[in-house]
Amino acid sequence: MLYCVLNWGLGHATRSIPVINELMNQGAEVIIASDGEALSFLSNRFPQLQAAVLPSYNIRYASSSMVLEMIRSLPKILNTIRKEKLVTEKIIAEYEINRIISDNRYGCYHPSVYSAFITHQIALRGPAGLKWSEPLLFLLHKRRIQKFRECWIPDFEGDSNLSGRLSHGHHLSAASYIGLLSHLELPDQTVDKSIPLLVICSGPEPARTRFEKKLSDELRKSTVNAVLVRGSLKPSETNHPENVQVIDMCRSKELASLIKRSDMIVSRSGYSTIMDLVKLNKKAVFIPTPGQTEQEYLAAYHLAKGNFYSVPERKFSLSAALKNGSAFTPFKMNDNNLLTEKIKAFLQ
């Protein structure tokens, strides 16, 4: 079977780990397909699996609005979807693929191959001033998703959920919830909290680099000792202060250990990060990527729920964020066997 992953930061790649592990546990022969750092990350994590290269979207998130950036890049995006559809057809013919799972790769499907699409965002969020467009965006997105036989939502049904209106309250045929997708495992033993602050950088460039520099500048004004995970293998453009230990990239066990040993985490409000923190029952301060409507919604949603503290990047002060964030109680949800049962049915 073919497993396709969007290269947009590392969130789609990291949350794919438990899905790929479960596929292999149930006897599936998996071929990974992606590009860039996502493909490198998964190839290092699963060196025993064959890997295929998909066309790169090469979207740089440089403006103040993700939606406007997507609109500007729409011709390039549609062209890349067409290209990845052609590449998918070649992979299907070469390896006799009989199943496809695509994490946000819209062109990775084929009418004759049973397929599933993974997304936590059925309803796209419009920026301020364009909220009226959300029903239209939902219908357009729904048409894309329904090219696949199934839609898998990494969340739980009901009021106690992580994605809110992004994936709840909308009708989409063949959609089902598969629980949390986190690549992090709970440590076997109790760990002592020895890291005052852990900073996790993630997301597309150049927003990720700006976030790294922003946090480094704030830490330079502080006496708190911190660990900063850059989330990139590219050389850093930032001169970090002496009170910061810098790690380019973490394997799953190392990141889980860092999170469990930390008093506080500061990160973007990406959905994969939220799932990781919920699984490990940790408190955090979220700084959503400016203009990225999905992250802004998730940060506001969990702040209103009392789950996590959040603050816009333009108003961020490390000392104030740590003080306000410490008042929140860690949020935890119990996972179950939804993913195991879903894959069992999918493979059959």
Image (cartoon, rainbow, N blue to C red):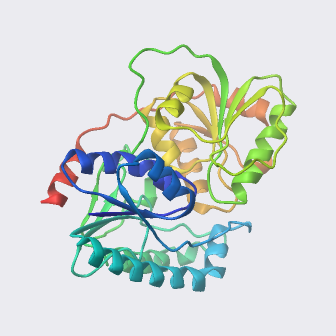
35 relative position to 71: left or right: left
Q: Position of residue 46 (x, y in %)?
A: 39, 48
76, 248: nearer the viewer = 248
Q: Taking the image as drawn, is residue 156 in sight?
A: no
Q: For the N terminus, give its image quadrant.
A: bottom left
Q: Position of residue 109 (x, y in %)?
A: 33, 76
193 relative position to 341: left or right: right
Q: For the C terminus, give its image quadrant.
A: bottom left
Residue in the image at 23% along x and 75% along y:
113
Tell me if residue 21 comes above or below residue 277 in the rendering: below
Residue in the image at 82% along x and 45% along y:
238
Q: Position of residue 144 (x, y in %)?
A: 39, 78
Residue 264 falls in image quadrant: top right
Furthest residue to the right?
Answer: 221
Tell me if residue 34 comes above or below residue 142 in the rendering: above
Residue in the image at 43% along x and 75% along y:
141
Tell me if residue 303 comes above or below residue 297 in the rendering: above
230, 53: nearer the viewer = 53
